[in-house]
Image (cartoon, grey):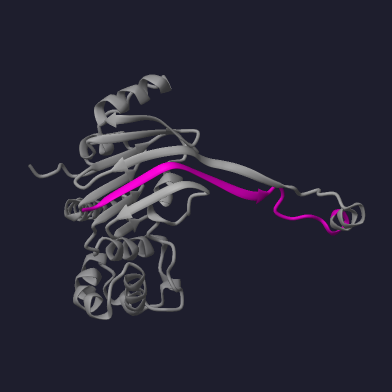
Amino acid sequence: MASIELENVGLVFRVRRQRRIPLKEYVLQRMFRSSINPIVEVRSLQNVSLRIGEGERVGIIGHNGAGKSTLLKVLAGVYPPTSGRRTVEGAISSVFDFALGFEPHASGRENIRYRGYLQGETPRSIRAKLDSIIEFSELGEFIDTPVRFYSAGMRLRLGFSIATAIEPEILLVDECLSAGDLAFRKKAQQRMRETMDRARLIVMVSHDLEVIRGFCGRVIWMEQGRIRQDGLAADVIEAYWSSSGKSRPASDAGTLPPRAA
Protein backbone atom coordinates (compact mmCIF):
# COMPACT_ATOMS: atom_id res chain seq x y z
CA MET A 1 0.00 0.00 0.00
CA ALA A 2 1.67 3.21 -1.22
CA SER A 3 1.27 6.30 0.96
CA ILE A 4 3.02 9.46 2.13
CA GLU A 5 2.25 11.30 5.36
CA LEU A 6 3.61 14.53 6.80
CA GLU A 7 2.83 15.58 10.37
CA ASN A 8 3.51 19.21 11.37
CA VAL A 9 6.54 19.34 9.11
CA GLY A 10 8.74 22.41 9.13
CA LEU A 11 11.84 23.11 7.06
CA VAL A 12 14.36 25.80 7.96
CA PHE A 13 17.46 26.64 5.94
CA ARG A 14 20.35 28.36 7.75
CA VAL A 15 22.26 30.56 5.31
CA ARG A 16 24.81 33.35 5.51
CA ARG A 17 23.56 36.82 4.63
CA GLN A 18 26.53 37.30 2.27
CA ARG A 19 28.18 34.63 0.15
CA ARG A 20 31.61 36.28 0.29
CA ILE A 21 33.33 38.67 2.71
CA PRO A 22 36.22 40.98 1.68
CA LEU A 23 39.49 40.26 3.48
CA LYS A 24 39.47 43.65 5.23
CA GLU A 25 36.03 43.05 6.71
CA TYR A 26 37.02 39.53 7.76
CA VAL A 27 40.07 40.87 9.65
CA LEU A 28 37.93 43.50 11.40
CA GLN A 29 35.42 40.82 12.34
CA ARG A 30 38.16 38.72 13.93
CA MET A 31 39.59 41.74 15.77
CA PHE A 32 36.31 42.92 17.26
CA ARG A 33 34.69 39.47 17.49
CA SER A 34 31.51 40.71 15.89
CA SER A 35 29.69 38.93 13.10
CA ILE A 36 29.42 40.96 9.92
CA ASN A 37 27.97 37.99 8.07
CA PRO A 38 25.39 36.49 10.43
CA ILE A 39 23.48 33.29 9.81
CA VAL A 40 19.89 33.88 8.71
CA GLU A 41 17.12 31.34 9.14
CA VAL A 42 14.81 30.94 6.15
CA ARG A 43 11.55 29.17 6.98
CA SER A 44 10.59 27.37 3.78
CA LEU A 45 7.81 25.17 5.20
CA GLN A 46 5.73 25.68 8.33
CA ASN A 47 3.40 23.20 10.07
CA VAL A 48 2.61 21.19 6.94
CA SER A 49 0.39 18.17 7.58
CA LEU A 50 -1.08 15.95 4.87
CA ARG A 51 -1.68 12.35 3.92
CA ILE A 52 -1.71 11.00 0.37
CA GLY A 53 -2.96 7.46 -0.13
CA GLU A 54 -2.71 4.84 -2.86
CA GLY A 55 -4.50 5.68 -6.09
CA GLU A 56 -4.45 9.46 -5.52
CA ARG A 57 -3.27 11.95 -8.14
CA VAL A 58 -2.37 15.14 -6.30
CA GLY A 59 -1.32 18.47 -7.78
CA ILE A 60 0.55 21.21 -5.94
CA ILE A 61 -0.01 24.80 -7.07
CA GLY A 62 0.98 28.26 -5.88
CA HIS A 63 2.95 31.32 -6.90
CA ASN A 64 6.73 31.35 -7.29
CA GLY A 65 8.37 30.98 -3.88
CA ALA A 66 5.26 29.53 -2.26
CA GLY A 67 7.05 26.29 -1.31
CA LYS A 68 5.73 23.92 -4.01
CA SER A 69 9.02 22.40 -5.15
CA THR A 70 10.39 22.46 -1.61
CA LEU A 71 7.40 20.44 -0.41
CA LEU A 72 7.92 17.97 -3.25
CA LYS A 73 11.58 17.53 -2.29
CA VAL A 74 10.59 16.91 1.33
CA LEU A 75 8.16 14.23 0.12
CA ALA A 76 11.01 12.75 -1.94
CA GLY A 77 13.40 12.75 1.00
CA VAL A 78 15.82 15.20 -0.64
CA TYR A 79 15.32 17.61 2.28
CA PRO A 80 14.86 16.02 5.71
CA PRO A 81 12.32 17.96 7.82
CA THR A 82 13.73 20.28 10.46
CA SER A 83 10.69 19.50 12.60
CA GLY A 84 7.75 17.15 12.40
CA ARG A 85 7.58 13.68 10.88
CA ARG A 86 7.63 12.19 7.37
CA THR A 87 6.34 8.65 6.81
CA VAL A 88 6.51 6.84 3.47
CA GLU A 89 5.28 3.41 2.39
CA GLY A 90 6.46 2.35 -1.06
CA ALA A 91 9.40 3.11 -3.34
CA ILE A 92 9.68 6.72 -4.51
CA SER A 93 10.70 7.69 -8.04
CA SER A 94 11.37 11.40 -8.62
CA VAL A 95 11.23 13.13 -12.00
CA PHE A 96 12.76 16.55 -11.46
CA ASP A 97 15.40 18.30 -13.61
CA PHE A 98 16.31 15.95 -16.46
CA ALA A 99 19.39 17.86 -17.62
CA LEU A 100 21.25 17.80 -14.28
CA GLY A 101 23.57 15.12 -12.94
CA PHE A 102 25.24 13.83 -16.09
CA GLU A 103 28.89 12.78 -16.11
CA PRO A 104 30.17 15.10 -18.89
CA HIS A 105 33.17 13.00 -19.93
CA ALA A 106 31.13 9.81 -20.23
CA SER A 107 29.09 8.89 -23.30
CA GLY A 108 25.31 9.01 -23.46
CA ARG A 109 25.23 5.21 -23.28
CA GLU A 110 27.37 5.20 -20.12
CA ASN A 111 25.23 7.92 -18.57
CA ILE A 112 22.15 5.78 -19.11
CA ARG A 113 23.75 3.17 -16.86
CA TYR A 114 24.86 5.72 -14.25
CA ARG A 115 21.48 7.44 -14.05
CA GLY A 116 19.66 4.12 -14.12
CA TYR A 117 21.58 2.88 -11.09
CA LEU A 118 20.69 6.10 -9.23
CA GLN A 119 17.01 5.42 -10.03
CA GLY A 120 17.26 1.99 -8.43
CA GLU A 121 17.90 -0.09 -11.57
CA THR A 122 20.20 -3.10 -11.53
CA PRO A 123 22.77 -3.92 -14.24
CA ARG A 124 20.39 -6.57 -15.55
CA SER A 125 17.29 -4.34 -15.60
CA ILE A 126 19.07 -1.41 -17.23
CA ARG A 127 20.46 -3.70 -19.95
CA ALA A 128 16.90 -4.77 -20.76
CA LYS A 129 15.83 -1.11 -21.15
CA LEU A 130 18.95 0.24 -22.83
CA ASP A 131 17.87 -0.10 -26.48
CA SER A 132 14.40 1.35 -25.87
CA ILE A 133 15.87 4.34 -24.00
CA ILE A 134 18.31 5.04 -26.85
CA GLU A 135 15.58 4.70 -29.45
CA PHE A 136 13.22 7.03 -27.60
CA SER A 137 15.93 9.69 -27.13
CA GLU A 138 16.45 9.91 -30.93
CA LEU A 139 20.16 10.60 -30.39
CA GLY A 140 21.31 8.02 -32.94
CA GLU A 141 25.09 7.82 -33.31
CA PHE A 142 25.54 10.60 -30.74
CA ILE A 143 24.70 8.11 -27.98
CA ASP A 144 28.38 7.07 -27.94
CA THR A 145 29.63 10.68 -27.88
CA PRO A 146 30.67 12.28 -24.54
CA VAL A 147 27.77 14.25 -23.05
CA ARG A 148 29.91 17.40 -22.81
CA PHE A 149 29.45 17.78 -26.57
CA TYR A 150 25.63 17.57 -26.36
CA SER A 151 23.42 20.58 -26.81
CA ALA A 152 21.01 21.49 -24.00
CA GLY A 153 18.16 19.92 -25.99
CA MET A 154 20.06 16.65 -26.46
CA ARG A 155 20.81 16.40 -22.74
CA LEU A 156 17.16 17.10 -21.98
CA ARG A 157 15.98 14.35 -24.33
CA LEU A 158 18.43 11.82 -22.90
CA GLY A 159 17.53 12.70 -19.31
CA PHE A 160 13.81 12.47 -20.03
CA SER A 161 14.21 9.10 -21.77
CA ILE A 162 16.08 7.66 -18.79
CA ALA A 163 13.79 9.12 -16.11
CA THR A 164 10.60 7.85 -17.72
CA ALA A 165 11.88 4.29 -18.19
CA ILE A 166 11.19 3.62 -14.49
CA GLU A 167 8.45 1.40 -13.04
CA PRO A 168 7.21 3.73 -10.29
CA GLU A 169 5.23 3.02 -7.13
CA ILE A 170 5.21 6.62 -5.89
CA LEU A 171 5.92 9.14 -8.64
CA LEU A 172 6.88 12.74 -7.86
CA VAL A 173 6.94 15.10 -10.85
CA ASP A 174 8.22 18.68 -10.91
CA GLU A 175 7.54 20.94 -13.93
CA CYS A 176 8.80 18.55 -16.56
CA LEU A 177 5.95 17.91 -18.96
CA SER A 178 7.65 19.67 -21.86
CA ALA A 179 10.94 18.31 -23.14
CA GLY A 180 12.86 19.24 -26.25
CA ASP A 181 11.51 20.60 -29.53
CA LEU A 182 7.87 20.49 -30.60
CA ALA A 183 8.09 17.13 -32.40
CA PHE A 184 9.80 15.41 -29.46
CA ARG A 185 7.54 17.16 -26.95
CA LYS A 186 4.39 15.48 -28.28
CA LYS A 187 5.99 12.07 -27.95
CA ALA A 188 7.37 12.97 -24.51
CA GLN A 189 3.95 14.01 -23.24
CA GLN A 190 2.46 10.66 -24.18
CA ARG A 191 5.41 8.87 -22.55
CA MET A 192 4.87 10.91 -19.39
CA ARG A 193 1.19 9.98 -19.38
CA GLU A 194 2.06 6.27 -19.64
CA THR A 195 4.58 6.59 -16.81
CA MET A 196 1.99 8.31 -14.63
CA ASP A 197 -0.63 5.68 -15.38
CA ARG A 198 1.72 2.95 -14.12
CA ALA A 199 2.29 4.68 -10.78
CA ARG A 200 0.25 3.79 -7.69
CA LEU A 201 0.45 7.32 -6.27
CA ILE A 202 1.40 10.60 -7.94
CA VAL A 203 2.24 14.08 -6.67
CA MET A 204 3.01 16.70 -9.30
CA VAL A 205 3.97 20.38 -9.32
CA SER A 206 3.07 22.53 -12.31
CA HIS A 207 2.25 26.13 -13.12
CA ASP A 208 0.01 24.84 -15.91
CA LEU A 209 -3.35 24.65 -14.18
CA GLU A 210 -4.96 22.93 -17.17
CA VAL A 211 -2.56 20.01 -16.73
CA ILE A 212 -3.38 19.91 -13.02
CA ARG A 213 -7.12 20.18 -13.64
CA GLY A 214 -7.10 17.47 -16.30
CA PHE A 215 -5.05 14.94 -14.41
CA CYS A 216 -5.36 15.50 -10.65
CA GLY A 217 -8.43 14.83 -8.55
CA ARG A 218 -6.97 16.62 -5.53
CA VAL A 219 -4.99 19.87 -5.36
CA ILE A 220 -2.90 21.43 -2.59
CA TRP A 221 -2.48 25.21 -2.75
CA MET A 222 0.76 26.38 -1.13
CA GLU A 223 1.28 29.94 0.08
CA GLN A 224 4.29 31.24 2.03
CA GLY A 225 5.37 27.75 3.02
CA ARG A 226 1.96 26.71 4.36
CA ILE A 227 -1.00 24.82 2.96
CA ARG A 228 -3.66 27.40 2.23
CA GLN A 229 -6.21 24.97 0.80
CA ASP A 230 -6.40 21.22 0.17
CA GLY A 231 -9.37 19.71 -1.62
CA LEU A 232 -11.03 18.83 -4.92
CA ALA A 233 -9.08 20.08 -7.91
CA ALA A 234 -11.88 22.19 -9.39
CA ASP A 235 -12.62 23.92 -6.06
CA VAL A 236 -9.01 24.71 -5.18
CA ILE A 237 -8.10 25.95 -8.66
CA GLU A 238 -11.16 28.19 -8.75
CA ALA A 239 -10.25 29.65 -5.35
CA TYR A 240 -6.65 30.15 -6.47
CA TRP A 241 -7.67 32.10 -9.57
CA SER A 242 -10.22 34.16 -7.66
CA SER A 243 -7.53 35.10 -5.14
CA SER A 244 -4.97 36.04 -7.81
CA GLY A 245 -7.30 38.50 -9.54
CA LYS A 246 -6.00 37.42 -12.94
CA SER A 247 -7.99 36.33 -15.97
CA ARG A 248 -7.96 32.61 -16.56
CA PRO A 249 -5.76 31.44 -19.45
CA ALA A 250 -7.26 29.64 -22.41
CA SER A 251 -7.06 25.88 -22.12
CA ASP A 252 -3.95 24.44 -23.75
CA ALA A 253 -5.26 21.14 -24.99
CA GLY A 254 -1.85 20.19 -26.37
CA THR A 255 -0.06 20.35 -23.04
CA LEU A 256 -0.80 16.79 -22.07
CA PRO A 257 -2.64 14.12 -24.01
CA PRO A 258 -6.07 13.32 -22.59
CA ARG A 259 -6.16 10.43 -20.19
CA ALA A 260 -7.57 7.22 -21.55
CA ALA A 261 -11.05 6.37 -20.31
Task: Please give the range of residues in magenta.
Answer: 1-25
Q: Is residue 19 visible?
A: yes
Please tell me which residue lies in front, 92 or 151.
92
Residue 21 appears at what percent x and percent y?
Answer: 78, 55
Residue 121 appears at what percent x and percent y?
Answer: 28, 72
Which quadrant would residue 243 be assigned to in this image?
A: top left
Please tell me which residue lies in front, 99 or 94.
94
Q: Does the stretch in magenta take in 100? A: no
Q: Quadrant of the C terminus?
A: top left
- The residue drawn where x is 27% and y is 76% is 122
- The residue drawn where x is 22% and y is 65% is 136
- The residue drawn where x is 19% and y is 46% is 55
Q: Is residue 253 visible?
A: no
Please tell me which residue lies in front, 133 or 180.
133
Vertical arrangement, residue 68 with respect to residue 237, above or below: below
Vertical arrangement, residue 123 with respect to residue 56, above or below: below
Q: Does the stretch in magenta take in 2? A: yes
Which quadrant would residue 165 be assigned to in this image?
A: bottom left
Q: Residue furthest right?
A: 31
